[in-house]
Image: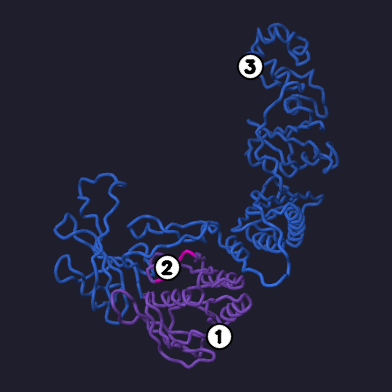
Chain colours: A purple, B blue
């Protein structure tokens, strides 16, 4: 429960890849703080925030957004293989970017392979002005696994494979 | 212009008149509660849908056993006939004076000169009537015979974008209701398309045989006249929100708010992305208060620095905050135990949820005071103590937190530490 690193990486990826297009942030307990996102260097003005009853409704809302061509960030506890497949299909049909944030141990064997990539994100020691994240690429189609260092507000690791199939750059 | 026809309904039992008036909209869009015991319906041009006025009355009698009703050319005459007339009678002249909705005092005074019926009152000279008995008897009489206008407060103005279907046999099955909703949506969307309008709010009302009137409300982030989407959203809510009871005898679909929506060329080259569709669906699935845009609000207090805006609002440009703000904000702040070496120093360790975090460094404090001008003066605690000193701290693993100390050392209350947010 005690980290915001994955939300930070999601904001960073949205800022780099998705740009100014609308994105939905949905969760059963949405505690994302827009001034914090603005401080981290992304503009929360184009984001929509939603509160769902439970994980199922959160995933369903993200699917609607992805199907309609928006980006979707959904934080949930449990994620079934079916839900993963549905999200991936919706993102493919709508051309959206979907990010699922979970607090879960890395179990590559049991997790769905419907996703384009899967990252394990931890906070990393850094200076007071730019929080750092250590993102480990656990699984990706067409990329080598590795560990990359991201810094909020400053940019990203040039080595990070942000040209993965699921991540299309804006513009 | 067609002659107006009014139906006055008088119920025996004490009933919720506003609800009854709403239900009566199954028969005509113009209905008004008529205290203390009835409902007034303007049935001009509506009776033929129910087999004429006799058919309409038969239908209402079947639904409202014990209610009395009458139809006349004026609302006042219908009121009197429903309450004092014989069933089927249409002549108001033999009715007693009470049928004119007069107060007891003028009735008693008129009775003293031998005037007992409306017919006798009508034969009196008007000028003398006004001089001797006030405005009321003459005005009520004029209203009853149609010489003076009467203002009736109908519960809704005649809606412009309304499609309604009455059914001879009440509908019960979900499939029937779904088909009816699709039909109504198609009709309404065709009219909206012709007018190049889109609905931003829709209401579907279901008139049940037992005088209940449940409704589905839809709201849209962007004007919409996509009949597939509207029908889908209505049918989704139909199963969840509408109980057909003993049957539904009429359905009305109404666009309560519309906005211009120009026609679009279909299938011509690249389309600009249109996010109205997912937004409209999300807004109706989650509800308008569960989906919001964030807008900055000018407050230093972190909890109040964000304002929830409707999805329809224009996206705001966010200024970059001058001071660090966390990505996740915990509401309410979580009490923690922190160890600070010297009072007013940043902590070196804190315990949250049973887990100790040793801190590598801390920056701060950022002092945020309460907006004292918005609170009543509290003599027991000085305002100076109601401050928060915020610190950004990082533990040995690199996790970064936003802590604050509430209050001052050497104050009335001992300072307390809270965790308010997470940076990473």
Q: Secondary structure at mark 3?
A: helix
Mark 1 against mark 3, which lies toward the viewer? 1
Q: Which residue is mark 2?
A: A32
Q: Quadrant of residue B276?
A: bottom right
- Relative height, residue B65 to residue B167 (above, below): above
* Residue B58, x across and y down, in percent: 81, 39
Q: Can you tell which mark lies on residue A165? A: 1
**For the residues marked 3 and 2, what is the alpha-carbon distance in whole angstroms?**
67 Å
Q: Quadrant of residue B5?
A: top right
Q: Secondary structure at mark 1?
A: loop
- Relative height, residue B350 to residue B205 (above, below): below
Range of the magenta residues? A41-45
Question: Can residue A48 be seen from the camera position used here?
Answer: yes
Q: Residues within 10 Å of mark 2 (few under 14, many from 20)?
A: many
Mark 1 against mark 2, which lies toward the viewer? 1
* Residue B257, x across and y down, in percent: 64, 49
Camera-nearest residue between B176 and B385:
B385
Q: Which residue is mark 3?
A: B104
* Residue B61, x across and y down, in percent: 77, 39
Chain of the residue that carries numbered disc 2 in the rendered image:
A
- The residue located at (85%, 42%) in the rendering is B51
**For the residues marked 1 and 2, what is the alpha-carbon distance in whole angstroms?**
27 Å
Q: Main secondary structure of the magenta part?
A: loop
Q: Residue furthest bottom?
A: A144
Camera-nearest residue between A164 and B372:
A164
Q: Residues within 10 Å of mark 3 (few under 14, many from 20)?
A: few
Q: Residues within 10 Å of mark 1 (few under 14, many from 20)?
A: some
Q: Is residue B360 left or right of residue B239?
A: left
Labels 1 and 3 touching (C-beta < 8 A): no
- The residue located at (63%, 68%) in the rendering is B272
């Amino acid at each position: 429960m005690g980290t915001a690193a994955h939300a930070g990486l999601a904001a960073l990826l949205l800022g780099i890849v998705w740009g100014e297009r609308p994105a939905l942030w949905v969760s059963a307990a949405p505690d994302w703080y827009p001034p914090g996102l603005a401080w981290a260097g992304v503009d929360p003005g184009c984001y929509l925030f939603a509160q769902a009853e439970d994980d199922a409704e959160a995933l369903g809302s993200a699917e609607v957004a992805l199907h309609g061509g928006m980006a979707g960030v959904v934080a949930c506890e449990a994620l079934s293989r079916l839900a993963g497949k549905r999200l991936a299909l919706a993102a493919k049909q709508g051309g959206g970017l979907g990010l699922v944030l979970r607090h879960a141990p890395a179990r590559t064997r049991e997790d769905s392979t419907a996703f384009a990539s899967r990252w394990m994100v931890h906070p990393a020691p850094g200076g007071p002005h730019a929080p750092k994240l250590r993102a480990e690429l656990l699984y990706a189609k067409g990329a080598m696994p590795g560990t990359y260092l991201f810094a909020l507000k400053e940019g990203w690791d040039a080595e990070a494979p942000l040209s993965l199939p699921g991540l299309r750059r804006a513009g | 212009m067609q002659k107006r026809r009014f139906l006055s309904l008088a119920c025996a039992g004490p009933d919720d008149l506003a609800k009854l008036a709403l239900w009566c909209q199954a028969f005509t869009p113009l209905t008004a509660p008529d205290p203390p015991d009835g409902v007034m319906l303007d049935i001009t041009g509506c009776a033929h849908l129910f087999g004429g006025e006799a058919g309409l009355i038969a239908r209402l009698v079947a639904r409202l056993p014990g209610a009395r009703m009458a139809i006349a050319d004026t609302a006042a005459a219908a009121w009197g006939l429903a309450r004092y007339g014989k069933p089927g009678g249409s002549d108001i002249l033999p009715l007693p004076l009470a049928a004119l909705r007069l107060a007891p005092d003028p009735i008693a005074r008129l009775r003293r000169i031998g005037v007992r019926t409306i017919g006798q009152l009508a034969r009196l000279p008007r000028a003398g009537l006004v001089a001797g008995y006030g405005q009321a008897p003459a005005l009520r009489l004029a209203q009853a015979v149609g010489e003076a206008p009467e203002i009736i407060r109908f519960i809704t103005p005649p809606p412009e974008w309304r499609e309604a279907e009455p059914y001879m046999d009440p509908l019960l099955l979900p499939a029937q209701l779904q088909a009816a909703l699709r039909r109504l949506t198609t009709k309404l969307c065709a009219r909206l398309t012709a007018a190049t309008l889109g609905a931003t709010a829709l209401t579907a009302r279901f008139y049940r045989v037992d005088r209940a009137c449940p409704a589905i409300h839809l709201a849209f982030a962007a004007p919409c006249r996509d009949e597939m989407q509207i029908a889908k959203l209505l049918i989704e809510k139909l199963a969840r929100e509408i109980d057909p009871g003993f049957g539904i005898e009429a359905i009305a679909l109404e666009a309560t708010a519309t906005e211009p929506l120009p026609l679009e060329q279909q299938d011509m080259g690249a389309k600009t992305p249109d996010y109205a569709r997912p937004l409209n669906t999300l807004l109706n699935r989650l509800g308008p208060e569960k989906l919001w845009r964030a807008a900055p609000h000018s407050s230093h207090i972190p909890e109040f620095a964000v304002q929830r805006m409707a999805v329809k609002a224009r996206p705001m440009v966010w200024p970059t905050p001058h001071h660090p703000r966390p990505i996740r904000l915990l509401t309410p702040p979580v009490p923690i135990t922190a160890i600070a070496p010297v009072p007013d120093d940043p902590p070196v360790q804190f315990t949250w949820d049973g887990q100790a975090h040793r801190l590598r460094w801390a920056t701060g404090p950022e002092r945020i005071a309460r907006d004292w001008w918005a609170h009543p003066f509290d003599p027991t605690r000085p305002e100076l103590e109601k401050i928060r000193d915020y610190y950004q701290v990082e533990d040995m693993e690199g996790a970064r937190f936003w802590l604050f100390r509430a209050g001052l050392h050497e104050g009335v209350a001992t300072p307390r530490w809270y965790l308010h947010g997470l940076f990473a």
